[in-house]
Image (spheres, rainbow, N blue to C red):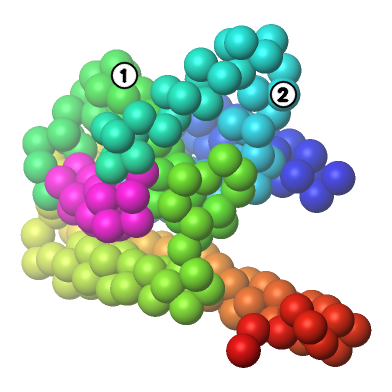
Amino acid sequence: MRANLALLAGLIVLAIVLGPWFDVLSDRAFAWHMLAHVIIMLVAAPLLLLGAPLRRLLALLPTGAARRVSHTLRTPLLLTLASPVVAWLAFAVVLYATHFSPMYEAALDHPAVHGFEHVLYLTVALVFWNPILAVAPAPHALSYPARIFYVFMAMPICGFLALAIYTASHPMYPNYAARLGSAAALVDQAYGGEIMWLGGGAALFVALIGLAAQWLRDEERRALVYDRQPWMEPR
């Protein structure tokens, strides 16, 4: 039931953010564009993963096809790409590369680049959240302390990016400067930095709290099992 609700919520959020009216707002103001990116990467992606889409896909496929897909998911290349270190680095590289390269400006001028940008954000976000949420068949399920450290170390990524954008002394994207004027574009840019700082930080903080609570629940369950079955307790 929870997985169904998570998947539905993720699809609804994604549909709203990728809808045409949100696109119009993103073209007009950097702050709206930044809000869309934060929602895609830090809200829609984890909700979609909690909906266990791979598990659902494998259940729907014929047995032979499901085995082939499962085998493909466990090839060395995909296992490496989905590893926590690679996932964390990919998250950081994509965030900084897209905001501090000509790609961001190109996305404002070319719908195809804009669409690719959204696909890239969603893909790297799914890879990033996979070791944290560990929804089967996740190949790299981290221990709870490792998951908490993983998320904690991601917080400065968003924080430093937000700070760089917020404190910039000039408009970083000529497209917005041409539409709004330099002064208004600079204010809009600062709002975008605040959204990354507050929105990104809040999403990761909620993840930290959720992981800590889940860890505590699992420890309580384990302790209860050991109380009932003392012979199971590790020596």
* Residue 47 in the image: above or below residue 206: above
Q: Please name the predominant secondary structure of the magenta segment in the image.
A: helix
Magenta residue span: 82-99
* Dot placed on the residue nearer the N-terminal end, 1 or 2: 2
Q: Where is residue 70 in the image (x, y as percent from the top left)?
A: 52, 26
- Quick one: 4 or 230, which is closer to the camera? 230
Q: Which residue is pictured at 51% across the width and 16% down the height?
A: 68
* SS assignment at label 1: helix
The residue indicated by pointer 1 is 111
- Determine the residue positioned at 63% across, 72% down: 210
Residue 23 placed where, x, y %? 44, 30
Above or below: residue 88 compared with residue 235: above
Above or below, comparing residue 216 to residue 25 in the picture: below
Of all residues shown, which one is farthest toward the right?
228
The amino acid type, in three-letter code, at marker 2 is: Ala
Foreground mark, 1 or 2, reads 2
Determine which residue is flagged by label 2: 59
**Residue shown at 29%/16% (left/top)?**
112
